[in-house]
Image (cartoon, grey):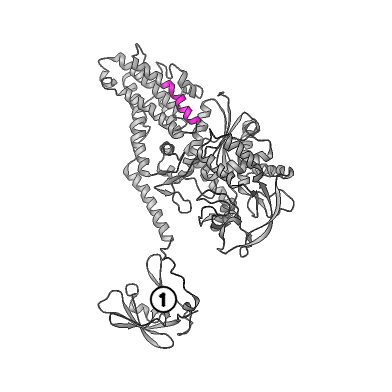
C-alpha cells in the first residue's frame, strides 16, 4: 500500500441527549482512533471525522422534560462529549455538529439535488397522529411491538432489540410516547427514498463484492434486509426541530435525522478542509480515497443500506471501502442502558481515575465486542491493569530506564560482540510493525493489542533470563550488560512507537523518558521500527524513570461497584413490584360487587395478635364489624374518623373468633407501606362506587 493512501475515517456521530459511555467507546471511538493514529504513523493522508448528532425526536423529548429548548440541550452535551473525547485522547481531525450553518447548508443542498433529479417519491400517506398532543408521532414519539421480534418497546423507526429498521405504521399496538394514547391515522405528505430500487445494486456491491473483506455480522444483516425486501423509506418528518425540508409547501417538516446525520460526515469534512486549506472533495469524491465508517451494530442499516443509497442517488461520491461494525458491550453482565443509568460514563471515569485514560483504552480494546457481544466488569478492569499493564509493560520499562540511569547515568551504552540471543531479539523487534499492522488492517484490534503485549513479554523474558540478569552480571561481565541494556532500550523504543495507537498517553510518557526530541513524527514512524538498525543510538541520553501505570486497589473497584448497586436500587425503587393481572372476569361478576363509602367509628387492636385491627364501620346502610390486617401500619387513633372504601357484600368470615363483615380496600406503596383507597371526604357514607 502506498504511504500516501488517502483515508476518510468516520466515527458514528454521538447523539447529544446524554454523555458518552464505555459501550460507545468500545464499539466505535477507541477502534476508530487506533486505526486513524496507525494510518497517520504509516504516512497516510487521513481525515478522521466526527461530530454531534443534534436533531431528532429524543432530543425534543428530553428538552421538554427539562423545560429547556432543544438547542440548549444539545449545546450542553456537545460541550461535555467534545471535552471528554479530547481528554481521553480521541484525535478527531475535526469534531463538528449538525446544528451548524455549514451542515444545514450541506444537507439542504444534498436533498435538493436528489429532489431535482427525481430520486424521491412524493406521497401522501396515513401516519400515526396523537390528537391530544396535536402532533404526528415520528420515530421515538411512538412505541409499540416490533413486527419482527415481538419486542414490546420498539420505537417508530427502529427496534433496539433486534436492530430492525421499520416505519412507525408497522408497529403492532402503537402508543404515543407523549400522552400514552392510542394514536389515530392521519394523512400527511412526505418524500421517500425508494430503497427497493437499489436492492440489486446493494446486493452486488456488498453481499457479493465484499464477501471476503467485510465482517460477517455486517454481511449477515445486509443480506437479511435485502432478502426480506427493501421498501421506500421516508426521509422527512413532521417535526419542528431539525433541518427544514427545502421544498415549497413543506412547512412544519424537517429532514429525517437518519437522512440528515450521515451527511454530517460530509459537512464536518468541509469545515475541516476549509480550516486546513484542503479540498474536501478529494476525501469524498476521488476514487483512490478509502472511506471507512466505524459504527455499532445498531447503525448497520443506516450506513450499509440508507446512506449508500443516498450517495448512489447523488452520483458524485465514493462508496465505503469498509464498515467494520462492532457488537455491543455489556456492563457487569447486564445491557448498558442510558435510560436506566446503567453505564460507565466517560466524563465520570475521567474524574474518578485521573491520568489513567490508557487503562480504560486498554481494557476496552482487549474486551472489544468485535464478533459478539462482550462484557465489561470492574474486577476484570482491575486484573488487566495490575496483571498486564503494571506487571508486564510497566515492569519491563521501569527496569530498563532505572538500570540505564543506574549503570550509565542515562547514556545509551555502546555494544560489542553481540550474542546470538541479542541479535535474535533485535530481529524480532523488526517483525512487529508488520505483525501488528496486519491485524489492524483487518480491523482485529484485540489481536493487534495482544501482539503489542507480546513484544513487551519478549523484553521481560530477555532481561530476566536466568543467569543473564544484568543486575547479577554488572560486576562480573560489564560488556555483556552493556549489550543487554542496549537491546532492552531498542525494544523499549519500539514499544514507545508501536503503543501510540493503543496507549497514546503512555506512549507520550515513554517517549519523554527516552528523550522525546529524538522521537519526532518522522523518526517515530511505523516503518522505522522495521527498518532502523538503531532506534535509540548509543551515547543518546535518556531521562529519569516515571511510573507508567499504578495499581488499581480493591477500594477503587468497590467504590465503582457500589455506585452501580446504588443505580440498581434507584431503578428498583422506580419500578413497582406489581402482581400480575388476575384471570379475566366478566361484567356480570364485576357488577355483583357492592363497593360503598364507609367511615371508621371505632378501632381496637385484637389482643394477642400483631396484625389484626377490629373496627366498627358505618357503611351508610348499617354499622358493622370489619377485621383487617393493618395493625402494623396504623394505630387505632389514626383510624377513627377516616373515610374508607368498603366491599360491603363480601361473605362474612371469622378471624380469631371475631366475625368480619366486609373488606376495606388498601394498596401498597413502593416502600411496602399500606395506603387507603380514599373516597372524597365530602361523599356521604353508603354512597356506592361504580
Give the prevailing secondary structure in the magenta stretch.
helix
At a point 28% along the width and 74% down the height, the residue shown is 610
Magenta-highlighted residues: 429-441
Element at label 1:
loop
Q: On screen, 280 above or below 424? A: below
Left or right of 526? Residue 653 is: left
Q: Is residue 634 above or below residue 445?
A: below
Quick one: 414 or 627, which is closer to the camera?
Answer: 627
Please identify the residue farthest to the bottom as the structure is shown.
Answer: 622
**Relative to the observer, which residue lies in front, 283 or 303?**
303
Please name the residue that numbered disc 1 is placed on.
665
Q: Is residue 490 left or right of residue 179?
A: left
For residue 616, say whether it is visible: yes
Kindly give the residue lying farthest to the front in the view shown: 227
Residue in front for this viewpoint, 63 or 619: 619
Q: Is residue 268 visible?
A: no
Query: In which image quadrant can residue 379 be found?
Result: top left
Q: Position of residue 553 (x, y in %)?
A: 32, 41
Q: Image point 37% across, 18% down: which residue?
A: 424
Residue 386 painted magenta: no
- Whole-percent x and y of residue 458? 36, 25
| Image mark count | 1
Amino acid at each position: 500500500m502506498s504511504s500516501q493512501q488517502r483515508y476518510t475515517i468516520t466515527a458514528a456521530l454521538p447523539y447529544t441527549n446524554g454523555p458518552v459511555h464505555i459501550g460507545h467507546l468500545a464499539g466505535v471511538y477507541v477502534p476508530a482512533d487506533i486505526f486513524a493514529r496507525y494510518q497517520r504513523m504509516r504516512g497516510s493522508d487521513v481525515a478522521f471525522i466526527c461530530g454531534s448528532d443534534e436533531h431528532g425526536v429524543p432530543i425534543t423529548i428530553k428538552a421538554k422534560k427539562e423545560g429547556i429548548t432543544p438547542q440548549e440541550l444539545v449545546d450542553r452535551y456537545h460541550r461535555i462529549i467534545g471535552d471528554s473525547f479530547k481528554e481521553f485522547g480521541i484525535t478527531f481531525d475535526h469534531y463538528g455538529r449538525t446544528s451548524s450553518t455549514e451542515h444545514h447548508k450541506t444537507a439542504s443542498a444534498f436533498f435538493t439535488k436528489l429532489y431535482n433529479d427525481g430520486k424521491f417519491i412524493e406521497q401522501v400517506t396515513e401516519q400515526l397522529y396523537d390528537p391530544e398532543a396535536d402532533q404526528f408521532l415520528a420515530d421515538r414519539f411512538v412505541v409499540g411491538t416490533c413486527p419482527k421480534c415481538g419486542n414490546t418497546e420498539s420505537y417508530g423507526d427502529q427496534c433496539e432489540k433486534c436492530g430492525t429498521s421499520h416505519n412507525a405504521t408497522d408497529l403492532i399496538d402503537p402508543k404515543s410516547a407523549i400522552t400514552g394514547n392510542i394514536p389515530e391515522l392521519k394523512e400527511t405528505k412526505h418524500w421517500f427514498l425508494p430503497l427497493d430500487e437499489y436492492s440489486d445494486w446493494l446486493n452486488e456491491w456488498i453481499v457479493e463484492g465484499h464477501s471476503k473483506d467485510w465482517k460477517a455480522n455486517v454481511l449477515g444483516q445486509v443480506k437479511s434486509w435485502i432478502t426480506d425486501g427493501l421498501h421506500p423509506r421516508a426521509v422527512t418528518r413532521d417535526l419542528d426541530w431539525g433541518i427544514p425540508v427545502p421544498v415549497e409547501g413543506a412547512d412544519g417538516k424537517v429532514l429525517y435525522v437518519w437522512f440528515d446525520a450521515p451527511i454530517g460526515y460530509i459537512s464536518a469534512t468541509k469545515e475541516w478542509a476549509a480550516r486546513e486549506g484542503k479540498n474536501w472533495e478529494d476525501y469524498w469524491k476521488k476514487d483512490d480515497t478509502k472511506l471507512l465508517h466505524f459504527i455499532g451494530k445498531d447503525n448497520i442499516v443506516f450506513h450499509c443500506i440508507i446512506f449508500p443509497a443516498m450517495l448512489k442517488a447523488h452520483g458524485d461520491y465514493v462508496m465505503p471501502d469498509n464498515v467494520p461494525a462492532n457488537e455491543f458491550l455489556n456492563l457487569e453482565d447486564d445491557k448498558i442502558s442510558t435510560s436506566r443509568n446503567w453505564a460507565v460514563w466517560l466524563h465520570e471515569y475521567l474524574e474518578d481515575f485521573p491520568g489513567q485514560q490508557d487503562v480504560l483504552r486498554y481494557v476496552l480494546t482487549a474486551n472489544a465486542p468485535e464478533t459478539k457481544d462482550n462484557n465489561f466488569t470492574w474486577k476484570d478492569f482491575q486484573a488487566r491493569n495490575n496483571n498486564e499493564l503494571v506487571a508486564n509493560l510497566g515492569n519491563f520499562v521501569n527496569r530498563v530506564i532505572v538500570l540505564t540511569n543506574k549503570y550509565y547515568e542515562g547514556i545509551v551504552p555502546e555494544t560489542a560482540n553481540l550474542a546470538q540471543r541479542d541479535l535474535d531479539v533485535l530481529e524480532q523487534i523488526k517483525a512487529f510493525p508488520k505483525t501488528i499492522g496486519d491485524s489492524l488492517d483487518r480491523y482485529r484490534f484485540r489481536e493487534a493489542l495482544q501482539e503489542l503485549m507480546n513484544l513487551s513479554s519478549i523484553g521481560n523474558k530477555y532481561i530476566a533470563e536466568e543467569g543473564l540478569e544484568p543486575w547479577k552480571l554488572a560486576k562480573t561481565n560489564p560488556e555483556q550488560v552493556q549489550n543487554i541494556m542496549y537491546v532492552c532500550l531498542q525494544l523499549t523504543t519500539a514499544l514507545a512507537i508501536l503503543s501510540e495507537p493503543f496507549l497514546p498517553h503512555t506512549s507520550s510518557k515513554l517517549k519523554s523518558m527516552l528523550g522525546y526530541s529524538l522521537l519526532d513524527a518522522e523518526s517515530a514512524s511505523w516503518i522505522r521500527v522495521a527498518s532502523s538498525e538503531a532506534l535509540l543510538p548509543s551515547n543518546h541520553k535518556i531521562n529519569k524513570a516515571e511510573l507508567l501505570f499504578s495499581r488499581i486497589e480493591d477500594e477503587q473497584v468497590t467504590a465503582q461497584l457500589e455506585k452501580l448497586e446504588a443505580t440498581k436500587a434507584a431503578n428498583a425503587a422506580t419500578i413497582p413490584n406489581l402482581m400480575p393481572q388476575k384471570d379475566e372476569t366478566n361484567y356480570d361478576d364485576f357488577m355483583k360487587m357492592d363497593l360503598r363509602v364507609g367511615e371508621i367509628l371505632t378501632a381496637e387492636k385484637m389482643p394477642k395478635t400483631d396484625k389484626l385491627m377490629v373496627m366498627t364501620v358505618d357503611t351508610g346502610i348499617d354499622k358493622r364489624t370489619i377485621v383487617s390486617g393493618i395493625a402494623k401500619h396504623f394505630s387505632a387513633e389514626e383510624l377513627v374518623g377516616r373515610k374508607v372504601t368498603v366491599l360491603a357484600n363480601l361473605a362474612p368470615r371469622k378471624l380469631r373468633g371475631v366475625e368480619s363483615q366486609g373488606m376495606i380496600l388498601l394498596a401498597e406503596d413502593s416502600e411496602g407501606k399500606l395506603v387507603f383507597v380514599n373516597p372524597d371526604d365530602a361523599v356521604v357514607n353508603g354512597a356506592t362506587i361504580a
